[in-house]
Every structure is written in C-alpha cells, then in structure tokens.
Image (spheres, rainbow, N blue to C red):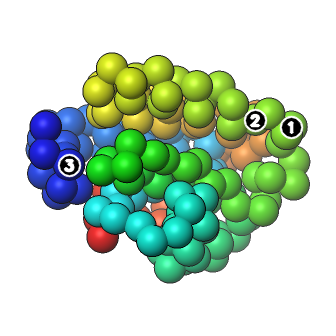
Amino acid sequence: MIFFPRKFLKKKEGDKILKSIKNAEKKTSGEIRVHFQKKIKKPVIEAAVDTFFRLKMDETKDRNGVLFFIVPRKKQFAIIGDEGINNVVPDDFWEEVKSILETHFKDKSWAEGLIKGIEITGEKLKKYFPHEEDDKNELSDEISYS
C-alpha cells in the first residue's frame, strides 16, 4: 500500500467514507470531516489542531465540529472535537472511537475503521447535538488532503 494520501484510499473507499459522514450528520448537528496529511513536522495532535483551525472547523454555530486527522506514513491519527463538544461530553468521550480506529488501522483496514469511527461519532453526538429539521451543513463533507 502506498502511503501517499491521494492514493491512500481507493475511490470506492473514499465514497463509502463520504456516505458515512452524510449518514452520521443526519443524526447530529455536529459537523464531521476527514483529513489526510502527507507529513508533519510536529506532534500529531498539534498538527491536527492547526488543521482544524485552517479548515475553519471552529466556525460552526454550535462549535460542534469533529476532525479525523490521519497521517498514514507515520501511522498516526488524532480526533479533534471543537469546544462546544468538549464542554459537554465526558472526559472519555473519544476513547471508544479511538479504540475502533486503532484496532482497524493495525489490520490496515483504514477505510473500514474510519467508517465505523464516523458512525459511532454520529451516534454519540446525537445525545448532545441532535439533528434539527432546519439543520444546515455548515462545513464541507469532502475528504481533504495536504
């Protein structure tokens, strides 16, 4: 498997991830994005936070954006939730999602891990940020790369 982000996923896998984002966002007003980073020069969490702000994920009405940040070459990832989420969820809120990603990524089931992680994120967020009838998609669902 080549670890260059644009070639990291097959189109079919990318389409499935996009579908899982759209399905998750039907359950919650939360906004979910996936970003692949080719390389980083700082710890993964710092790079993820920088990307979170660069993608303007902090500009949602309820501050409920979630970024799945993946660095394939380093086999690292981070899940970043905005302050609206972090202010209301328990401290261990992301542990289940993190565990699912770790398990699947160890087996090189990258797309499957992301899909399951996104699905669970939507389920978990709906308790705190349920989908409203007038909910607007505030951020792009597209997978980003840099």
Decide if residue 7 is on the left or right side of residue 42: left
Q: Nearer the viewer, residue 74 or 68?
A: 74
Q: What residue is disc 3 on?
A: 3
Q: Amino acid at mark 1?
A: Pro
Q: What residue is disc 1 on?
A: 90
| Numbered disc 1: secondary structure | loop
Q: What residue is disc 2 on?
A: 93
Which marked residue is nearer to the observer: mark 1 or mark 3? 3
Say which residue appears at 37% left-offset and 49% top-offset. 74
Q: Say if 7 sits above or below 136 in the image.
A: above
Decide if residue 88 is on the left or right side of residue 84: right
| Numbered disc 3: secondary structure | loop
x, y (%) of residue 17? Answer: 32, 40
Q: Are marks 2 and 1 in contact (CB under 8 Å)?
A: yes
Say which residue appears at 86% left-offset and 37% top-offset. 90
Res 131 quadrant in image: top right
Say which residue appears at 39% left-offset and 58% top-offset. 35
